Image: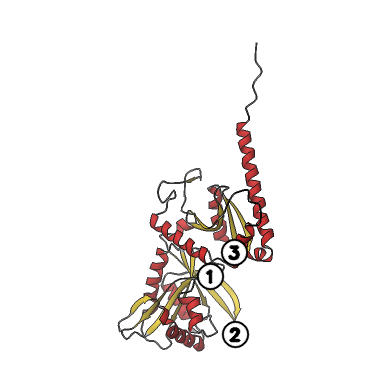
Amino acid sequence: MTLTVRPVAADDAAELADLLNAVIAAGGTTALQEPYTPEALDAAYLTGPNVHCCFVAEDEDGTLLGFQTLGRYPGLPEDAGDIGTFARVGGTQRGIGSALFAATAKRAAELGLGAINATIRADNTGGLAFYTKQGFADHGVTPGVPLKDGTPVDRVHKRFVLAAEAPAKRKLSLRFGETDAPTLQKKGRGWAISEKRLDALHERAREMRRNPSDAQEALAEALTRVETGGYSFKRQAVIGSAIVDFACKQLMLVVEVDGDADAAFTAARDKSLTEVGYRVERIAAAQVLADPDAAAQRISDAMRSIHTERRAKRSATRRPAPRSPRKY
């Protein structure tokens, strides 16, 4: 049997919805428990705004044998995609998942992602074995997630690191010398990053600007109602290999609107931003949505503080040193 892997098309949605709903009905292999309409499936996993890529596998007759989707997921770092793999119930074609993953991993690297996350039910031994075979390593466990009937089942989290890019991702692609000071290099627009990768990052940033979260949109609007001293923010700004929610580069201030973020990754990225001179202000998305004006005022206060500190430093450097008394 000939197996072909290709990007998903909009008219695949109906057949893939039937395929996925059969998997859900069979039970035991997926955390999904409610059936999908073609429209809902397309928005969530095929071509929606939070989908990085989706590939399908088909036989020589054009029958869809399975699909693999990679998308954004709340709580994951921006450079980590969340993967899902689904094969037709009763299918006998071996190698579908591996063929799909080869295409997905290649596209993820092209998009500048650093890692791929998979969440598998602990009782899905076939799924766990598949992702392990592809090179995924255990990353954590969420215990006792209840199924529809109330049965608690652990969720195993695995992660595949795109090795060529991942180390640079976690350090903003900075290179540190013996004094642990970042050294900018005159390539990659000032960072030690390839032009190709920067182009991919800027394209991702444009997509994110077109599809902001509710909290990001609320904060952006609230910032127009507070005093910013004539300074401005850029939304979804690229700094090194990071994409930050808001950046005021004149004041070297970064504002991040947090959901359920990866704490270790967040700390590493904040450290890298701080090492190149940025101050990072983090505000919980829930706080922004509860009171956008208070969140914006907090940012305004931070801007005023930075501006005041800079003025004080400039005044200190201009003040003449006291003269020593003359000796006669």
Task: Estimate the x, y position of residue 167 in percent, counting from the top left.
Answer: 46, 57
Q: Amino acid at mark 2?
A: Lys
Q: Residue at x 40, y 64 (%)?
A: 110
Q: Of the two numbered discs 1 and 3 on the same chain, state the one appearing first in sequence.
A: 1
Compared to 263, does 313 lie above or below?
above
Q: Residue at x 63, y 48 (%)?
A: 229
Closest to the observer: 139 or 82?
A: 82
Q: Of the two numbered discs 3 and 2 on the same chain, state the one appearing first in sequence.
A: 2
Task: Estimate the x, y position of residue 288 in percent, counting from the top left.
Answer: 65, 63
Which type of secondary structure does the marked residue at label 2 adopt? loop
Which type of secondary structure does the marked residue at label 3 adopt? helix
Compared to 145, does 235 lie above or below?
above
Task: Estimate the x, y position of residue 73 in percent, counting from the top left.
Answer: 53, 70
The circle drawn on residue 266 is none
The circle drawn on residue 73 is 1
- What is the distance, in whole Å, between disc 1 and disc 3 at their CAs? 18 Å
Which residue is label 2 attached to? 148
Which residue is label 3 attached to? 217
Q: Residues within 10 Å of mark 3 (few under 14, many from 20)?
A: some
- What is the distance, in whole Å, between disc 2 and disc 1 at their CAs? 21 Å
